[in-house]
C-alpha cells in the first residue's frame, strides 16, 4: 500500500469533512468522506495494513474533530474515531471475499456498515466517559435511541458520499499499489480486470 498517498488523501478528506461537508448537512445528518476512504482501504489493502491505516486515520480525526458537550465545553477525546474505525474494519475484513469490491456501490454499502459500527463505538466511549465523569452526553436530549437513529442516518449519508469517492479512488488504482488487486497502469484507465 502506498502510505504517502494514503496520508495525503486522508489529510485532505479530514480537512474536507471539517470544513466543506458542513454545507451538505441536512438537519442533524452530516455526511463525511473519511469513512469512504477507510472502507476503500479496508477492502483492498493487505490485511496487516488495514488496522494500522484505520487506527492512524482515526487518531487524526480524533485530534481534528472536537465535540461540544451539552454544557458547552469543547472536548477532544482520543479514541472514539480510532477505535471505531478499528472495530468497523474488523467487521469488513471477513466480507472482502463476498463484496463485489470493484464496484463503487459495494464500497458505499461497506461504508454504511463501517460508519454505523464506528458510530456505535463512538457512542459507547462517550457514554463511558460521561458515566465516569458525571457529565452530560454529547448528543441532544433525544437520548440514546435517538442518537443511534442519527448514527444510522449519518452512515447512510457517508455511504452516499463514498460512492463517487470510491469511483475517484479507483481511477488512480495503480497508485495505491495494493497487492494482487489487478490494477492497471493507473491514470484515467483505473481498474482493469486481469482476465482478458
Image (spheres, rainbow, N blue to C red):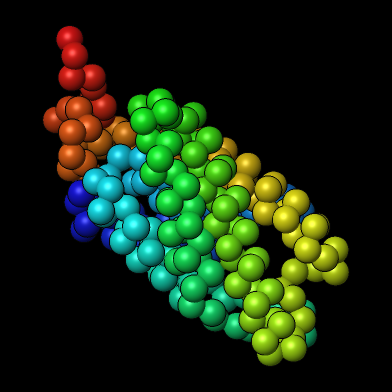
In the image shown, does 70 or 51 lie closer to the viewer?
Answer: 51
Q: Position of residue 56 (x, y in %)?
A: 35, 66
In this rendering, position of residue 40 left or right of residue 66: left
- The residue sitting at 40% across, 40% down in the picture is 94
Query: Does 3 sit left or right of 126 as displayed?
Result: left
Relative vertical location of residue 26 with respect to residue 44 in this rendering, above or below? below
Query: Is residue 146 in view?
Result: yes
Asked if residue 188 shows in the view, the reply is no
Residue at left offset 67%, top offset 54%:
151
Q: Residue at x 44, y 44 (%)?
A: 92
Depth check, front residue: 177 or 12? 177
Instruction: Indicate the position of residue 165 as horizontal and vertical percent values.
Output: 43, 40
From the viewer's side, name the closer residue of 67 and 8.
67
User: Which residue appears farthest toward the top when viewing the image?
Assistant: 196
* 68 versus 33 height, above or below: below
Question: Which residue is at a point 64% across and 68% down the rendered structure image?
Answer: 124
Location of residue 1 in the rendering, given as x and y in whole percent from the top left corner = 20, 49
Amino acid at each position: 500500500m502506498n502510505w504517502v498517498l494514503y496520508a495525503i488523501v486522508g489529510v485532505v478528506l479530514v480537512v474536507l469533512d471539517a470544513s466543506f461537508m458542513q454545507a451538505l448537512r441536512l438537519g442533524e445528518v452530516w455526511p463525511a468522506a473519511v469513512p469512504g476512504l477507510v472502507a476503500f482501504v479496508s477492502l483492498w489493502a493487505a490485511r496487516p495494513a488495514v488496522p494500522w491505516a484505520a487506527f492512524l486515520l482515526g487518531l487524526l480525526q480524533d485530534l481534528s474533530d472536537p465535540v461540544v458537550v451539552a454544557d458547552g465545553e469543547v472536548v477532544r477525546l482520543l479514541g472514539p474515531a480510532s477505535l471505531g474505525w478499528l472495530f468497523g474494519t474488523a467487521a469488513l475484513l471477513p466480507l472482502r471475499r463476498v463484496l463485489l469490491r470493484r464496484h463503487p456501490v459495494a464500497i458505499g454499502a461497506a461504508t454504511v456498515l463501517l460508519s454505523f459500527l464506528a458510530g456505535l463505538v463512538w457512542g459507547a466511549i462517550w457514554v463511558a466517559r460521561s458515566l465516569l465523569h458525571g457529565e452530560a452526553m454529547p448528543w441532544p436530549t433525544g437520548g440514546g435511541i435517538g442518537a443511534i437513529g442519527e448514527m444510522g442516518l449519518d452512515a447512510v449519508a457517508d455511504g452516499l458520499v463514498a460512492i463517487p469517492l470510491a469511483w475517484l479512488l479507483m481511477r488512480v488504482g495503480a497508485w495505491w499499489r495494493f497487492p494482487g488487486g489487478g490494477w492497471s497502469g493507473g491514470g484515467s484507465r483505473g481498474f482493469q480486470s486481469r482476465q482478458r
